[in-house]
Amino acid sequence: LHRELLRDGYLDMLVAAGVRLLEIACGPCCAIGQTPPTNGVAVRTSNRNFKGRSGNPTAKLYLVSPETAAATAIMTIGWLIAMFLPYYCARLFTTDSTLISMAIDGVRINMMVFPIIGFQMVVTNFFQCIGKVKVSIFLSLSRQLFMLLPMAFFFPLVWGLDGVWYSMPASDLGSFAMTIPILLWYLRKIKQQ
């Protein structure tokens, strides 16, 4: 697996994103070389994530699967590229300077809330996996159908072309805000049972 990751270039991409790959040994368990800053946040794929175990008693540690850690790194790199290098993103699709100029603003606006999109999708899949199909379908449709379509129609009436761009992050933010109370309601319901 290590050789395949290296051969296909994925290892370089992960290391460039700040991922540290270690041998299976005691290093991560006793925080040798991986101590997060005071009040810092660290995402770990090692199960040694309880308070103080990282070498810093104030650090907040989150346990995730290696796939989630890799997806987070890839998404973060994509978001940083889109936010700080939108010209090059647009240039991949056209050389027309007018279109590139319009796309630069559009890419930045569209990517404003990109980091939270995954939460809504994961929660939707969670409800599907536990057999709550109606809730899953409702959440799935909330982003594109219930929010994006009306916003894509009405926002341009107020903000012109920028309204089309604003409709996308607004629908993402709206569906995120709708997903949180539904998830909390269900988790409280489970806790009461």
Image: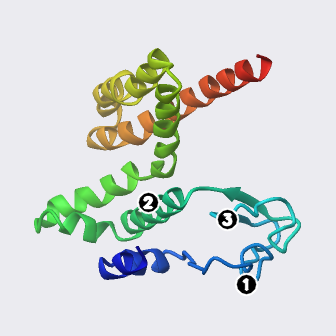
Residue neighbourhood size for the residue with mark 1, other residues' Cα within 10 Å, grouped as few (<14), some (14–19), many (≥20):
few
* Residue under the point 37% across and 81% down: 3
Q: Given this view, does label 3 or label 2 mark the residue nearer the observer?
A: 3
The residue wearing badge 2 is 75
* Residue under the point 61% across and 31% down: 180
In this view, the residue farthest toward the bottom is 33
Q: Nearer the viewer, residue 91 or 154?
A: 91
Choose the circle earlier in sequence order: 3 or 2. 3
Is 104 situated left or right of 94 in this image?
Answer: right
Occupied quadrant, residue 95: bottom left
* Residue under the point 56% across and 78% down: 21
> Contact (CB < 8 A) between labels 3 and 1?
no
Is 102 situated left or right of 184 in this image?
Answer: left
Choose the circle earlier in sequence order: 3 or 1. 1
Residue 192 x %, y %: 79, 18
The residue wearing badge 3 is 46
> Contact (CB < 8 A) between labels 3 and 2?
no
Total marks shown come to: 3
Three-letter amino acid code at the position of disc 3 = Ser
Residue 154 x %, y %: 33, 25
The residue wearing badge 1 is 33
Residue neighbourhood size for the residue with mark 3, other residues' Cα within 10 Å, grouped as few (<14), some (14–19), many (≥20):
some
